[in-house]
Amino acid sequence: MIGISSHAAEDKNFNYHVDRFADIEVLRYEVPEYSRLSLNQKKMLYYLSQAAQMGRDIIWDQNGAYNLQIRQLLENIYTNYKGDKNSKDFKAFEKYLKQVWFGNGIHHHYSTDKFAPEFSKDFFMAEVAAIPDADLPLAKGQTREEMMAVLVPVIFDPTVMAKRVNQDGSQDVVATSANNLYGEGVTQKEVEDFYNALKNPADETPVSYGLNARVVKEDGKIKEQKYTVAGLYGPAIAQIIYWLDMAKGVAENDAQKAYITKLIDFYITGDLKLFDEYSILWAEDTKSDIDFVNGFIESYGDPLGMTGSWESYVNFKNNASSERTEKISSNAQWFEDHSPVDPKFRKDKVKGVSAKVITAAMLAGDAFPATAIGINLPNSNWIRAQHGSKSVTLENITEAYDMASHGNGFNDEFVIDQPTAKMMDDYLYITDMLHTDLHECLGHASGRLLPGVDQDALKENGSALEEARADLFALYYLADPKLQELGILDNPNAYQAEYYKYMLNGLMTQLNRIEPGNDIEEAHMRNRQLIAKWVLENGKKKGKGGKDVVELVKKNGKTFVKVNDYPKMRELFGNLLAEIQRIKSEGDYEGGKKMILKYAVKVDPKLHKEVLDRFSKLDIPPYRGFINPVYTPVYDQAGEITDITISYPENYSEQMLRLSRDYSPLTK
């Protein structure tokens, strides 16, 4: 078996645990093999990390129009508080501030519901009253009274800006979402009409319209406010450009220098054609050790799935573990040719699929504090088809999750029997990694749109269906003998560990992330329930011996997932993949909407309560995220950098306050 980390920490005494509050645990991640980097590589990593942190204010403002002002006000109260820090109000205030930091604003990072303060309005008003006018984060021309008239209901009234991203297709999802991607009074129809007028169905290389713009209405007309150095977010973008230019000076090769230059040009002009050119150059660079993502990338924060949230990852290659992803990517055409989807929806020729395992060194923007464990970019369908894509698995992040979870009692509470638990102990870490590899490397890169199909045709359901498509591709191939043939897995039944965990999560345990009475909103959670419930329903009486392929059974009064036929489950995954690929390839909005509404959204309240009760006894946080290491330049007497040291000196609050102090170009 090749390229699988032993997931043993490099430093046995490394402390992963940082903080715990509300439904969140904050961890730190280790950066193995940092010491192997050359001085120029360390410089580049440092410069890219500076560029990453300089974009923090952007995601806060994208998430809500008042987030930056609220952050400044809350931090001012927190750092200058003179009262009893053990009081109920202050403890509740501290919890709220930590939630706001984690959500990059006043809405939960996952559910997108607004946080509910547990401190009193009187406490808040008294603390604000104690702040001198000169220290208040007043907008230009705004008085103290005017600021409070706006912010008090935004913070305390649950009906004001209640949901950052509303994906209910029966409503105007633009008008009912509280993010700051659209201006006051803009409707969903106006946005769709505006961009449809710009799109040319015959264009085989369409730009990602709306990716880097806020849509507003001025004098009754819809227009874009572009995110550029001379436009919206200009001060932050200027700082990002400065540090990208510094990184360009120590680039590892000409290819890397070329795409950094192109990214800078895009930030200056806002020209999405330049962003596509940058994306192609970036995807084609498979030689560089240091790598990064920086820009307006993923569109989960937009109910229409168009505008990119600002994010950044800085990383370097994990050479040992990349052997497995290189094996997978080099066989991309085989996997595409043997996919269970209709041949007309497959790529005739898979181009430029590359994959590697990386060590994350800095997380920022929408990738911080909560982060993905795998990435596949570019998102543009035509670039993937004509030029390929690059996939990465963040192994040190997965390892941090794994190390922080040891001994939490989950298997004893939720896994149906000891043999299944042992199978998961033996193979879940490996198959989880491979699921991420296959999802990012091949799943997102697979399939094609039929000519003339708009890549935004699935609208508010597009993100969930795309994640389901990639997950199903990965699940289907986890059980394929090809992985043994390639030397990646040593046991033909290893896939069963991931299959069981996936069904358990999709049917039950992810419900720990949902408040009682709520529907499932987040795209990845919708994807997982869609797959699990579809397989549960469509596997009735179709397993060996006429049994259900998978079922929910009672044992000692508790509900468990029981799998009766793993090979048949693989067949069902293939059938669902074929249908979701058809929906995507044909741009079948109604078909996608019907599937989402039937399987992905609604929650069984009785099962939900049971899951919450069982989790409450384990004290396992539903959500986790990270703080970053600190990189510090070492200078000689001539002012030249001689080294960049890495350290982990901060707790959660210390890091968040430092970021606000040192990386706030939009609030200075």
Image: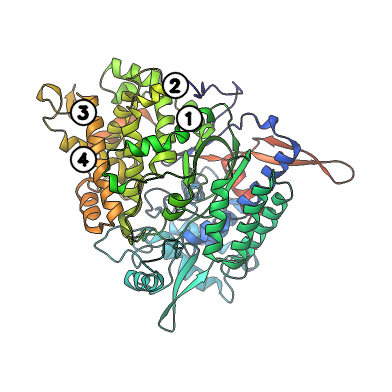
Residue drawn where x is 48% and y is 32% of the image: 325
- Residue matched to label 4: 534
Residue 61, percent across and down?
51, 61
- Front tag of 1 and 4: 1
Q: Earlier in the sequence, mark 3 or mark 2?
A: 2
Colour scheme of this structure image? rainbow
- In the rendering, which numbered label is found on residue 327? 1
Residue 322, percent across and down?
53, 31
Disc 2 crowd, CA 10 A, few/some/many (<14, 14-19, 20+): some
- In the rendering, which numbered label is found on residue 487? 2
- Front tag of 4 and 3: 3
Determine whether label 1 and label 4 are within 8 Å by CB. Answer: no
Residue type (three-letter) at the residue carrying disc 3: Lys
* Secondary structure under the numbered disc 3 in the rendered image: helix
The picture quadrant where one finds residue 429 is top left
Residue type (three-letter) at the residue carrying disc 2: Gly
* Secondary structure under the numbered disc 1 in the rendered image: helix
- In the rendering, which numbered label is found on residue 568? 3
| Disc 1 from disc 3: Cα separation | 27 Å
Residue 357, percent across and down?
53, 34
